[in-house]
Amino acid sequence: YYSKKNQRKWMFWSTRLREEQRQRDTIENGLRRALKEDEFFLEYQPQFSRCGSVTGLEALLRWRTPDGRLISPATFIPVAENSGLILNISEWVLERTCAQLKLWQTQPGMETVRVSVNISPRQLKRSDFIRQTERIVSRSGVDPQRLSFEILESALASDIDDVQRKLSALRDMRINIALDNFGTGMASLTGLRKLGIGEVKIDRSFVMDMERNPDHLMAIRAMIAMCQALGINIVAEGVEEETQFSALCDMGCHRFQGWYFSRSQTPDRLVHLFS
Ligand code: C2E
Ligand code: MG
Ligand code: MG
């Protein structure tokens, strides 16, 4: 039986669900247009060594709509992933990154800069992922050793044999593999070794509250110890404070990415870091 109160609740939820669906549809249509009308661009966030030199860049996707609004990847990537549009978008991201690397080859100080690209779980699953990567990279004429692919730790959860085959093919191409948002998934010691992971990125959520949450501090310590034992590079993500930086240094972390050092930048604003 429906009480008045329940009925009101149900109305509330169904209205809200409809509203959320409508928003997703709007974003999805916007994304289709964005691909056609070239509304995407890339920014690059530098990663630093302990002594402050740039060790690499992460390509981060940006979307500016015709009315000038900047939409966060946190909003549109999930919609792109669900609708399958992520496949076309990812292709664009890799092509654009390679084109940028090609340009940087003639930029003094940036000739050998390395760039990480985020790989979506759906992209990793597709059967022609390797062939497509080979095609884009070889057409661009860029040395694959300057590329790193960031795979979400959560993407390792499904069909591990398929993932292993693909990561091994990437390694054969000399593309580096980094595990993104490390610590939030289930990657095991043996898994990291078997998959030939060259680098892990400690998730921002651990760094964010490491000074207040002893469990997270301990988790970071354990992750660093584990990676050191396996000879895997460690990057700490989301470093915002000097105190986080120095604590991470003390724990043996060697590479850092975060607003304390630099936000993501358009290519023209990056140049000064390398000159
Ligand atoms: P991610 O790969 O973990 O990238 C790091 C995110 O943390 C970026 O957010 C970056 O701007 C942000 N960040 C960096 N340093 C700090 C810091 O010190 N404090 C805080 N609060 N945030 C920091 P962004 O650019 O909004 O991207 C969010 C996520 O969207 C990325 O997380 C990645 O999963 C996804 N994404 C971005 N670009 C692409 C892409 O080209 N392809 C795919 N598939 N996903 C992408
Ligand atoms: Mg990433
Ligand atoms: Mg991350």
Image (cartoon, helix red, strand yellow):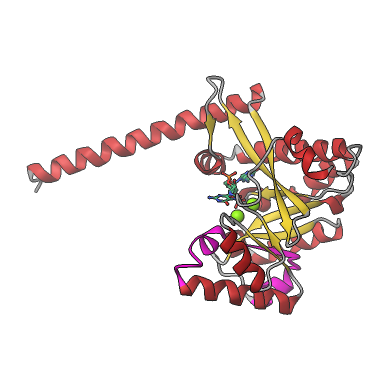
Q: Is residue 175 left or right of residue 2?
A: right
Q: Nearer the viewer, residue 159 or 119?
A: 119
Q: Nearer the viewer, residue 262 or 196?
A: 262
Q: Is residue 188 above or below residue 16?
A: below
Q: Nearer the viewer, residue 170 or 96?
A: 96
Give how far across and how far down residue 19 sits, in percent: 34, 33
Give how far across and how far down residue 70 sits, in percent: 54, 31
Give the quadrant of ligand 3: bottom right
For the point 89% across and 48% down, the residue is 143
For the point 53% across and 64% down, the residue is 206
Q: Is residue 237 something that shows in the picture?
A: yes
Image quadrant where residue 102 sits = top right
Q: Which residues are magenta?
A: 189-213
Give how far across and how far down residue 30 sits, in percent: 53, 27
Q: Is residue 103 above or below residue 129?
A: above
Q: Nearer the viewer, residue 53 or 162?
A: 53
